[in-house]
């Protein structure tokens, strides 16, 4: 007699024999008991979880007549009547199985549907089972839609697929869908024990545990691997033989690796990796086993006392969980998980495995004794070089001489808070002569009396014009463009300069870079014939732009000379114009939102104002 493989020999023949799919068994059993039957069922799930088995048991339940031939629809088929035995043997004429992977065209589906017009010959129902239904073509799906939606009362459809995402929603909506879940390793382990007990095959618990994990939720895979292991072990299952057959890494090596990583023992890590190479163990399997152990360790670290007492490896897992910190456990788990994808990129699998394991040591502080400590690069502190105050050629020397008398001696340091704003911008190293003219100024909040010349000038020759300065000094000015988004801080000088620049722009006296210099600058100080401007960008402070702006001012009736410095700008014509534009935009939006007609449209018709669609109307004349 030919040998029947375990996967076929121990295929469940009733709902009571099924394992791991209690949710499906319960739903179908209750439906059969109350005879609330749907006309189309869709079973989804990965390979080897029982989709075809459930279909055959359902067909037997619908057509079973009992041992005495008087039975009706039942959730517990007898297994001995003609219908049950013929369905198990695959020769029941009213039960048709179609493999859609090889019969995916519209012609095969039409040939199947042609049989739907005929009533059952032997059984109570015709059952059409279409396996791997997602492989059907679009035309085949369309051909079966009408019959699938309204089949004859004696016809039931059973569809099975491993990829329900590829099934059209028009088919999904016509079916009652059941998702068969992958089976837990514990469930597979328990079932394998019963099967091997019935077969009288001796097996070690460790060997069964390896087979249950290798099946990855598929009972058919577990039984097929068990057949292979029985042949490999000459009729018995030993853990060492099964591990060798599967190419799985010995958990002893895995525990050794994790222990060495926890103790930062790089030598043991490399030696263990080399031992795995010599034994021919799979590098991918080693990383996979490590992820399993690390996952259990992380669970123990988060939930102490959650280990399974029946697991012989629980004690070792708990020891490692206490040895390795929780953050390093998570890091090592992530490295092993992503390291499996790097194996194919490396020239050697075990070179990649060694690098993955040593990567954790690279992140552990103080692992390599000979490695130098990480040092933060410290740049030497260099005093910021003050920007010179640019003054045009031909400036009067008495202004420069007056400033020199007003400046404190360089040997005595001046606190930054007491330093004069404009005087601070003119600070230079000892022995350096300022190239241009610096304005003598008076701070309105803290007036400082400048040193007067020894020979008093006639009163008629002195013009006392107070000079206003900005609040911040050059010393704390950031790099150009750093404060471009700073808010507007209105000043009296800024308002005066704004009006002057608007006049120049209206008369088209300035353009291009000269216009940009005027818009982006701030009037810091001014007297009868000297104005001091400040800009943030050095690119605007060119000699040609400054001279052209000065010429435009003189042509407009401002007979002054300009000096330009680099520093923080808080009140420029450009910022004032932006603030005015923003204020007008807000006023326009408020006007539209408060309009009664607009509110009525929004309230009654659900109208919405498109963001960015409201624009203020430009006035014909600029307000002053």
Image (tube, rainbow, N blue to C red):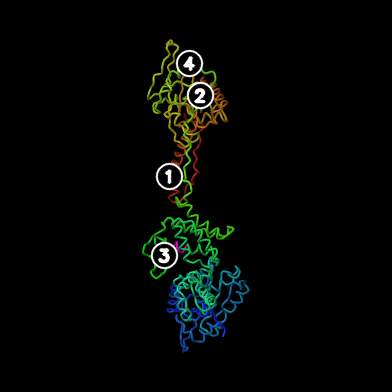
Q: Identify residue for label 2.
A: 563
Q: Earlier in the sequence, mark 2 or mark 1?
A: 2
* Image quarter of the N terminus: bottom right
Q: Which one is in front in this view, the residue at disc 2 or the one at disc 1?
A: 2
Q: Residue 324: in sight, yes or no? A: yes
Q: Which one is in front in this view, the residue at disc 3 or the one at disc 4?
A: 3
Q: CA distance from mark 4 to mark 2?
A: 16 Å
Q: CA distance from mark 3 to mark 1?
A: 77 Å
Dot 1 lies on which element? helix
The residue closer to the viewer here, 92 or 110, is 92
List x then y, in percent, for residue 604. 44, 51
Q: Which residues are magenta?
A: 291-295
Q: Earlier in the sequence, mark 2 or mark 3?
A: 3
List x then y, in percent, for residue 574. 50, 32
Q: Identify residue for label 4.
A: 398
The residue closer to the viewer here, 604 or 66, is 66
* Crowd around label 3: few <14 · some 14–19 · many ≥20 (10 Å): few
Q: Identify residue for label 1.
A: 596
Q: Identify residue for label 3.
A: 316
Q: CA distance from mark 2 to mark 3?
A: 80 Å
Q: Looking at this view, name the residue that lies furthest to the left.
A: 305
List x then y, in percent, for residue 358. 50, 55
**C-beta proximity under 8 Å, tags 3 and 1:** no
Q: Which one is in front in this view, the residue at disc 2 or the one at disc 3?
A: 3
Q: Earlier in the sequence, mark 3 or mark 1?
A: 3
């Amino acid at each position: 007699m030919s040998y029947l493989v375990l996967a076929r020999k121990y295929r469940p023949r009733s709902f009571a024999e099924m394992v791991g799919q209690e949710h499906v068994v319960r739903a179908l059993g209750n439906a059969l008991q109350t005879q609330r039957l749907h006309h189309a069922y869709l079973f989804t799930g990965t390979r080897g979880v029982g989709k075809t088995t459930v279909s055959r048991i359902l067909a037997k339940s619908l057509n079973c007549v009992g041992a005495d031939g008087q039975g009706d629809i039942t959730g517990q088929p007898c297994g001995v009547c003609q219908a049950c035995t013929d369905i198990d043997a695959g020769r029941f004429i009213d039960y048709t199985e179609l493999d859609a992977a090889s019969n995916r065209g519209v012609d095969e589906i039409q040939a199947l549907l042609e049989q739907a017009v005929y009533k059952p010959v032997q059984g109570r129902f015709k059952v059409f089972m279409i396996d791997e239904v997602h492989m059907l073509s679009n035309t085949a799906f369309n051909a079966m839609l009408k019959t699938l939606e309204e089949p004859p009362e004696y016809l039931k459809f059973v569809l099975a697929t491993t990829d329900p995402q590829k099934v059209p929603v028009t088919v999904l909506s016509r079916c009652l869908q059941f998702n068969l879940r992958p089976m837990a390793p514990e469930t597979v382990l328990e079932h394998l024990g019963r099967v091997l007990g019935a077969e009288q095959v001796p097996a070690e618990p460790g060997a069964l545990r390896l087979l249950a994990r290798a099946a990855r939720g598929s009972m058919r895979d577990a039984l097929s691997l068990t057949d292979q292991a029985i042949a490999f072990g000459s009729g018995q299952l030993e853990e060492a033989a099964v591990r060798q057959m599967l190419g799985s890494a010995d958990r002893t090596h895995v525990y050794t690796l994790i222990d060495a990583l926890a103790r930062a023992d790089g030598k043991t890590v490399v030696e263990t990796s080399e031992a795995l190479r010599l034994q021919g163990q799979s590098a991918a399997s080693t990383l996979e086993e490590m992820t399993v152990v690390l996952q259990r360790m992380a669970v123990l670290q988060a939930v102490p006392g959650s280990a399974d007492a029946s697991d012989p490896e629980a004690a070792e897992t708990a020891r490692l969980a206490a040895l390795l910190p929780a953050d390093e456990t998570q890091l090592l788990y992530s490295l092993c998980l992503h390291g499996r994808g790097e194996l194919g990129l490396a020239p050697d699998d075990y070179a990649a495995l060694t690098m993955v394991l040593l990567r954790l040591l690279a992140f552990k502080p103080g692992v390599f004794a000979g490695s130098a400590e990480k040092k933060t690069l410290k740049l030497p502190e260099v005093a910021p070089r003050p920007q010179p105050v640019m003054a045009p050629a031909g400036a009067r020397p008495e202004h420069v001489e007056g400033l020199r008398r007003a400046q404190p001696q360089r040997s005595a340091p001046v606190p930054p808070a007491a330093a004069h704003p404009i005087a601070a911008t003119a600070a230079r190293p000892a022995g350096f002569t300022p190239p241009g003219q610096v304005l003598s100024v008076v701070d309105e909040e803290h007036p400082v009396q400048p040193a007067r010349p020894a020979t008093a000038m006639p009163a008629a020759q002195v013009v006392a014009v107070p000079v206003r300065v900005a609040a911040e000094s050059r010393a704390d000015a950031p790099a150009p463009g750093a404060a471009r988004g700073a808010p507007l801080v209105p000043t009296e000088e800024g308002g005066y300069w704004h009006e002057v620049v608007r006049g120049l722009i209206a008369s088209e006296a300035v353009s291009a870079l000269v216009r940009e210099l005027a818009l982006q600058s701030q009037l810091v100080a001014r007297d009868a014939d000297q104005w001091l401007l400040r800009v943030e960008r050095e690119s605007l402070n060119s000699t040609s732009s400054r001279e052209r702006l000065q010429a435009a001012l003189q042509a407009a009736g401002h007979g002054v000379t300009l000096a330009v410095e680099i520093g923080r700008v808080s009140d420029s014509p450009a910022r004032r114009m932006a603030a005015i534009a923003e204020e007008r935009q807000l006023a326009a939006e408020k006007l539209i939102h408060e309009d009664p007609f607009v509110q009525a449209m929004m309230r009654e018709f659900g109208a919405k104002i498109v963001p960015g669609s409201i624009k203020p109307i430009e006035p014909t004349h600029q307000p002053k």
